[in-house]
Amino acid sequence: MDKQQLATLISEGKAVLGMELGSTRIKAVLIGEDHSPIAMGDHGWENRLENGVWTYHLEDVWTGVQDAYAKLAADVQSKYGVTLTKLSGIGVSAMMHGYLPFGKDDQQLAEFRTWRNTMTEQAAAELTELFGFNIPQRWSIAHLDQAILNGEAHVSQIAHLTTLAGYLHWQLTGQKVLGVGEASGMFPINDETGKYDQKMMAAYNQRLAAKGIAWKLEDILPGVLDAGEDAGVLTEKGAKLLDPTGTLQAGALVCPPEGDAGTGMVATNSVAVRTGNVSAGTSVFAMIVLEKSLSKVYPEIDMVTTPTGKPVAMVHCNNCTSDINAWAGMLHGFAAAAGKEVSMGDVYVTLFNAAMEGDKDCDGIINYNYFSGEPVTGLEEGRPMMVRMPDSKLTFANFARSLVYGAIVSLKLGMDILTAEKVQIDSLLGHGGFFKTPGVGQNLMAAALGTPVSVMETAGEGGPWGMALLAAYRVNRQEGETLDAYLNNKVFGDNKGSKAEPDAADAEGFNAYTKLFVAGLEAEKAATKSMR
């Protein structure tokens, strides 16, 4: 569509909005009838470490959401000369899971505890044993149970427990619901019903009763919806929350809210069996849609679902690009001190491209990118650390390659379990900031995982675009039309992106790096215990 046609589409309220609250950026994407982005807005923010808890304040949530929306509206005005007043559909997404409890008067009872926290080890272990199902530390049920084990006073007052995506949706629509993919990170989902597992819920209610808790789990959890189902409409209150100027009108259809795992699957067309995607940003996770369940419970593998309820094996690592960002900032500062004007974008491109020139095994330079704990490698806390052998060549290229390897080596350790389980993957697509520099993150990820990795043009903005696609599906779906069919026929067509095959030499080098990385984990563990 040309600019005038897009202006008309926006004026008639036919555009669809997707928003996602990631760990470092809140992003908003507007799409047209062909599902391509037509306007964008974003807002940078950071989590806080307060009293040992990684958190975000809810007032910062709304400041960020409103700023991202205002920038998107300004982008619309600048590009098309029209004012954004109404939308046909909206979808909201956020970083996965975590803990947001509210009382009967809708008051927040405890700080938002994000996915990054690794404070629920006891609860996660006990629930995994109780259910015979792996419960990761970041899941909402693990946080809830740990709060009970800790004797936290607010627990008896809980009337509603949700995630950040669920909170946003609730405020915009008045509906306390979640998409099934996000719900599967609150409490296990039954593969057959697509709802919370009733046997596990009954077992947990017995646990609650034994601890003197009056409410039952079903009383406080959000409802569960499949992609495309009716999740309410944007209310007058919700429109004012998004756009305090009052310009945005109420009434847009709103799709079930999802986490960034679900939006990643949609943005990479990875919702069908034997497809998978890798989302690599502040955290990194790979999600593979399974043909059958795994042979046993693995603490390193989470079992979640697609936005339509299909079982998914997920390897999630808390740490990915944060250490790259930190080093890039230092290098930017060095350039400034040397009187050189270099943009942060140029620093990243230079760093990533240099990685391809380094020794395949980084010549013994190993980077532990652990800003926080990493369950895949059994660490409750993290201390970013770089170690090298005395005879390692500390060149810029080897240093850069070690940073890139360090961002994804923990993911490789988890994915090796699926390889041993003989899980079949027909296609693996990557998205997120790690893949922005062409031919680097994609190629080295393929070498690390031993499977081809494809990247689409939308790789850097996958999440909010994926959420916009879910909103468009809610608005446009025909009777009986599955999400798989909608994405294949109306969004992606034959576009599979650029594909990188694993390079044998890179793979051999990454395996050598991994071996040394694992050998040095004791040093990382010692640092977390000794450096206080």
Image (spheres, grey):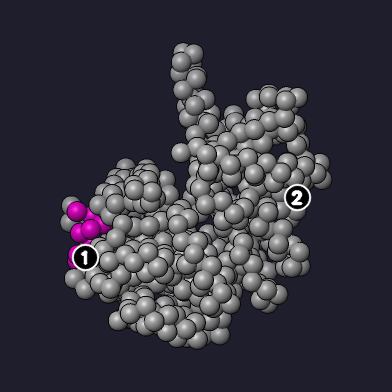
Q: Is residue 391 magenta?
A: no
- The residue drawn where x is 27% and y is 67% is 154
Q: Is residue 332 left or right of residue 394?
A: left
Locate residue 363, reporting x and y percent. Answer: 75, 31
Q: Quadrant of residue 109?
A: bottom left
**From which residue to which does the magenta span run?**
235-244
| 478 horizontally vs 251: left or right | right
- Residue 473: image location, x then y, percent: 45, 70
- Closer to the camera, 404 or 174? 404
What x and y, as percent, mark residue 465?
A: 46, 57
Q: Is residue 105 visible?
A: yes
Looking at the magenta stretch, what is its main secondary structure?
helix
Q: Are marks 1 and 2 in contact (CB under 8 Å)?
A: no
Q: Position of residue 218 (x, y in %)?
A: 37, 81
Closer to us: 215 or 434: 215
Residue toward you, 114 or 321: 114
Residue 33 visible here: no
Query: Tag 2: Cα neighbours inside 10 Å, few (<14), some, or many (≥20)?
Result: some
Amino acid identity at mark 2: Glu
Q: Which residue is mark 2?
A: 501
Name the residue tied to disc 1. Answer: 107
Q: Where 258 sits versus 216, above or below?
A: above
Q: Residue at x 50, y 86 (%)?
A: 199
Q: Residue at x 63, y 40 (%)?
A: 523
The furthest residue to the top? 339
Q: Residue at x 76, y 49 (%)?
A: 502
Which kind of residue does numbered mark 1 sit on? Answer: Gln
Mark 1 element type = loop
498, above or below 270, in the image? above
Q: Earlier in the sequence, mark 1 or mark 2?
A: 1
- Badge 1 local density, few (<14 within 10 Å), some, or many (20+)? few
